[in-house]
Amino acid sequence: MTRVFNFSAGPAALPEPVLRQAAEEMLDWRGSGVSVMEMSHRGKEFMSIHAQAQALLRELLAIPPNYKTLFMQGGAIAENAIVPMNMLRGKASADYIDTGEWSRRSIEEAARYGRVNVAATSKGSGYTTLPARGTWQLDPEAAYVHICSNETIGGVQYHFTPDVGDVPLVADMSSEILSRPVDVSRYGLIYGGAQKNIGPAGLTIVIVREDLIGHALPCTPSAFDYAVVAEHDSMFNTPPTYAIYIAGLVFQWLKDQGGLAAMAQRNEAKARLLYDHLDASSFFSSRVDRSCRSLMNVPFHLKDPSLDEAFLKGAQARGLVQLKGHRIVGGMRASIYNAMPLEGVQALVAWMREFEMQHG
Ligand SMILES: *Cc1c(COP(=O)(O)O)cnc(C)c1O
């Protein structure tokens, strides 16, 4: 068996100890005689798995008691609709900050349910920076302000929590959730699909302040009404049981690693290694503004794009996979989520050095 270093943007690499434990427990979960996949979601075994995952998530993020954690389905793209359906709360419009492909998708979808005010955009920069907070044209009457805290495709990340006054801040954190500590109390709602930095695709995490729940548009499907989901403890419909189980194992792994502060340090060290190499090289480059470079998704370009294929082929041969950049940005992209060890980034930088020697 050979495991490679998987730089996929998502579904992405999982911690190897988690996969090993899941393999061990595959046929017989802790003496139950069944796989987690075969359990009733209302049985005591799965209820304990579910409760443990919820408790660990709350502990890792130090989620205040006046927030609900919901385990939903449909991914962040479904939340692009579910958020306005639940969060407009009879108000006329919502503010959105446009910082790249994922916030653009959020804006397009939200506009089907209410009036969207694009309060700031970094489109003019080719989405290589964030619009300065001082330029945001926020509406104090807005239902909420929506940001994408880490643009997975462009590689742009907020390294601060924007102050938006009393208007609830809503963040799509799909590609950075649990990569660092977050002051949840600064947000009205945080959401993210699990398949980047948590676990298998199919599970969506929503963390929402209680007082914002209970105002869904009448047309909202019951399974997507936060009040209904919260009231049924995320079991209104059959939850993605196996994805929740794996997420719980990842949460435990994160706790064993020292929690989110320790993960943040490791993630910073990994990203620094890669960005330092990009900045020192005249052969490779990062186009993203230094103030907002993502610690999770690192797009980079070769000076000569005709060498892209050779770079990728050599990387593959060295067990460094999924480095091809998103078609919108081109070049390469290394996604270095929690589960990517420092050794993976070291191996990538070593290959970059070797390749530059051959071709530079
Ligand atoms: C991947 C991603 C999405 C899309 O997630 P789905 O699970 O496909 O719905 C949305 N937003 C961000 C920031 C992402 O990284």
Image (cartoon, rainbow, N blue to C red):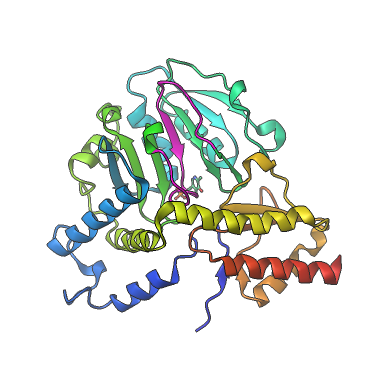
- For the stretch drawn in magenta, the main secondary structure is loop
Q: Residue furthest right?
A: 360
Q: How many marks?
A: 0
Q: On the rendered structure, is 318 left or right of 147? A: right
* x, y percent for residue 175: 50, 50
Q: Is residue 325 visible?
A: no
Q: On the rendered structure, is 221 left or right of 250? A: left
* x, y percent for residue 321: 61, 68
Viewer-closest of 211 and 180: 180
Figure quadrant of the C terminus: bottom right
Which residue shows up at 37% across the image and 25% down it? 88
Query: Residue 140 occupies which quadrant of the picture?
Result: top left
Query: Residue 232 occupies which quadrant of the picture?
Result: top left
* Magenta stretch in the rendered image: 160-183
* In magenta stretch: residue 350: no
Q: Is residue 261 visible?
A: yes
Viewer-closest of 171 and 118: 171
Which residue shows up at 67% across the image and 58% down it? 274
Residue 353 higher or lower than 234, as above or below: below
Residue 128 higher or lower than 41, as above or below: above
Viewer-closest of 65 and 102: 65
Query: Residue 343 occupies which quadrant of the picture?
Result: bottom right
Which residue shows up at 28% across the image and 56% down it? 53
* x, y percent for residue 157: 57, 42
Residue 319 higher or lower than 7, as above or below: below
Q: On the rendered structure, is 225 left or right of 250? A: left
* x, y percent for residue 81: 40, 36
